């Protein structure tokens, strides 16, 4: 897409290219001012795009695959006996789907893939990435509400009686977000060529670009509503815990402090992963749509956006800590599974050692 920004003295052409991972890249071209100056060009550091980010995402992919693989094994051995476990199970599914998109981003950023892979990334994996990101944000909000209820009314068993409602709510979230994201796949429908695939925006129809903008605004609303819910819930949780701390001193003080740390891990993950990205998007979007930034400032904002997007991806590796510290059933099952594996490995090692000893003893007698 190209827009003309005109004034009395100068005119600029602003070209906005869709990056395939949710944003537009902007190139500024300025007409001739004198015989000696023809264009204003800004180039990005290819080492960061093609080396640093792919290496970082590779580590994230390996760690996330191991951690979420273990989480899936443990969770699907647990019965869905509370809203909390239902929301955590949906979260681990979302994180796993997000991790599956990382190899495509790694190959695309490192320019190791065939040009058809770029088209596949534009049409499918970048859409799945953002689809799962905002599902994770929604479920973090629901988990926070559940923990707020548990803190304020610790002996209320209503959460265990509304399992069907939690399952219907979870399914509705997946269906609504899928229906919101599906047109982004369908409307990226132009014929792939090596030239046109350089920009994902070139692959979208006119209505596809409009729909992408609608989805972007909807996702922003989802984040800020969830942000408000989490902040309000944690203000109330802090107030409740402080009141409880004042009532229970001496013997119960230490255990109460441990509970505080565990409860606040959710807001810690949310602020580390999602808040920087959404705050960085505000000036980055302005740099795309307003002629108020220099080229150097624009690319600084681009790298800030990409770095904070990496933090959003880091959520797939931090969520398992929420499962471990806040879900007792998950923690006990994981520890039990680890002990069984350790016992089996120890028994196997002892059998191998005994067998080697017997063979060595027999050879000595001969």
Image: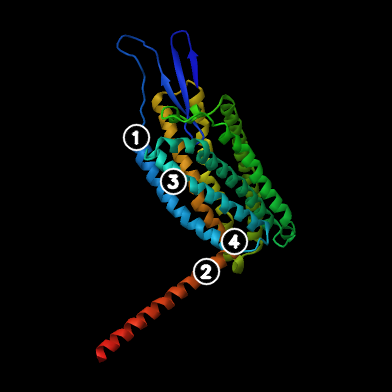
Numbered marks: total: 4
Mark 4–mark 1 CB contact (< 8 Å): no
Which element carries disc 1, helix, strand or loop? Answer: helix
Q: Earlier in the sequence, mark 1 or mark 2?
A: 1
10 Å crowding of disc 1: few (<14), some (14-19), many (20+): few
Comes first in the chain, label 2 or label 3: 3
The numbered mark at residue 103 is 3
User: Residue under circle 1?
Assistant: 46
Q: CA distance from mark 1 to mark 2?
A: 45 Å
Q: CA distance from mark 2 to mark 4?
A: 13 Å
In screen coordinates, is 107 left or right of 288?
left
Element under disc 3:
helix
Viewer-proximal residue among 123 and 76: 123
Residue of label 2 = 337
Q: In this view of the protein, can residue 309 be seen by the observer?
A: yes
Q: What residue is shown at x 36% (from left), y 42% (from top)?
A: 52
Of circles 1 and 3, which is in front? Answer: 3
């Amino acid at each position: 897409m190209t827009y003309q920004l005109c004034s009395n003295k100068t005119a600029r052409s602003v070209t906005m290219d869709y990056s395939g991972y949710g944003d537009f890249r902007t190139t500024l071209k300025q007409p001739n001012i004198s015989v000696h100056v023809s264009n204003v060009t800004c180039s990005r550091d290819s080492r960061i795009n093609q080396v640093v980010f792919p290496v970082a995402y590779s580590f994230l992919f390996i760690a996330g695959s191991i951690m979420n693989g273990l989480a899936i094994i443990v969770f699907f051995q647990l019965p869905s006996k509370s809203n909390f476990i239902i929301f955590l199970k949906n979260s681990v599914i979302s994180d796993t789907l997000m991790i599956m998109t990382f190899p495509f981003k790694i190959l695309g950023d490192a320019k190791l893939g065939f040009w058809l892979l770029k088209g596949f990334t534009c049409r499918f994996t970048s859409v799945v990435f953002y689809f799962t990101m905002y599902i994770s944000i929604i479920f973090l909000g629901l988990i926070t509400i559940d923990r707020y209820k548990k803190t304020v009314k610790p002996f209320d068993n209503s959460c265990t009686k509304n399992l069907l409602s939690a399952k219907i709510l979870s399914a509705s979230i997946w269906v609504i977000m899928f229906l919101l994201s599906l047109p982004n796949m369908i409307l990226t429908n132009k014929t792939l060529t090596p030239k046109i695939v350089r920009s994902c925006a070139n692959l979208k129809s006119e209505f596809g670009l409009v729909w992408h903008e609608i989805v972007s605004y909807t996702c922003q609303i989802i984040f800020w509503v969830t942000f408000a819910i989490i902040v309000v819930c944690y203000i109330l949780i802090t107030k409740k815990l402080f009141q409880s701390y004042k009532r229970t001193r001496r013997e119960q003080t230490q255990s109460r402090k441990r509970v505080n740390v565990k409860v606040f891990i959710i807001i810690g993950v949310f602020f580390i992963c999602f808040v920087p990205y959404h705050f960085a998007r505000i000036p980055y979007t302005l740099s795309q749509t307003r002629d108020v930034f220099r080229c150097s400032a624009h690319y600084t904002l681009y790298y800030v956006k990409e770095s904070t997007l990496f933090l959003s991806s880091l959520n797939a590796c931090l969520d398992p800590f929420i499962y471990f510290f806040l879900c007792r059933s998950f923690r006990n099952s994981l520890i039990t599974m680890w002990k069984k594996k350790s016992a089996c490995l120890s028994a196997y090692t002892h059998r191998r050692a005994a067998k080697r000893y017997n063979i060595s003893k027999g050879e000595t007698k001969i």
